[in-house]
Image: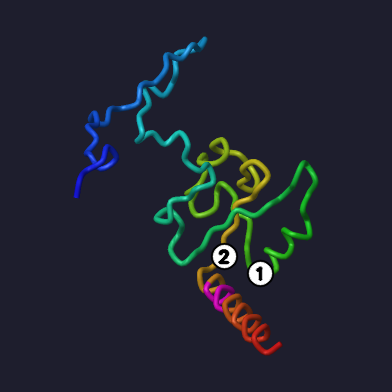
Amino acid sequence: MKRTQEDKPIDREPMREPMRPALKMKHKPNWESLDPTMTAGMDRFHINPERIPEGMSALWVTDSCLGQPQTHRRSVFEAGGWTPVHGEDFDGLFDGEFMPKGAQGEIKLESSVLMMRPIELTEQAKLQDKKEALNKVRASRIT
């Protein structure tokens, strides 16, 4: 069988890194000296699980939205055992971490308040949520 022009192997140049065009910016690009291990973008609401007192679970609960108190939403969490944490609670464990050191009142960050409850209550609530979800799935299969 005779080879046609289309059958001949094509000589290709090796792949090269794409050239970036020179960027004209007033400020020097901050990505040129970027340290990927920086934690600047870390979640401000993050609480290291090792810092949560043993036997407790923590949760940030919405306290207000656009300046309007969310009293009903908050009361639902409080009825479930969630209790606001103050700076002096747990021997001052969180004092100065989310608010200025020595600040009085509940620990708040933006429009949320830090709350805690015993881990047993959280585990019971998760189990109840799972049961309710399974019941909804079962009910949807029947209809």
Q: Percent x, y for residue 57?
A: 51, 62
Which disc number belongs to residue 80? 1
Q: Say whether residue 12 is left or right of residue 128.
A: left
Q: Say whether residue 70 is left or right of residue 44.
A: right
Alpha carbon distance from label 2 to label 1? 9 Å
How is colour applied across the structure in the image?
rainbow
Dot 1 amino acid type: Gly
Label 1 SS: loop
Q: Say whether residue 62 is left or right of residue 16.
A: right
Residue density around tag 2, few if under 14, some if 14–19, many if 20 or more, within 10 Å: some
Q: Is residue 14 above or below residue 112?
A: above
Pick whichever of labels 2 and 1 is earlier in the sequence: 1
- Residue 77 is drawn in which quadrant? bottom right
Label 2 SS: strand
Q: Say whether residue 81 is left or right of residue 53.
A: right
Which image quarter is the C terminus in? bottom right
Q: Residue at x 42, y 14 (%)?
A: 22
Q: Is residue 29 above or below residue 137?
A: above
Q: Percent x, y for residue 87?
A: 56, 46
Q: Residue at x 50, y 41 (%)?
A: 97
Residue sitting nearer the eye, 7 or 140: 7
Residue sitting nearer the eye, 131 or 121: 131
Q: Are marks 2 and 1 in contact (CB under 8 Å)?
A: yes
Which disc number belongs to residue 117? 2
Q: Main secondary structure of the magenta part?
A: helix
Q: Residue at x 64, y 50 (%)?
A: 113
Residue density around tag 1, few if under 14, some if 14–19, many if 20 or more, within 10 Å: few
Number of numbered callouts drawn? 2
Residue sitting nearer the eye, 18 or 6: 6
Which disc number belongs to residue 112? none
Q: Over which residues does the magenta segment extend? A: 123-127
Dot 2 amino acid type: Arg
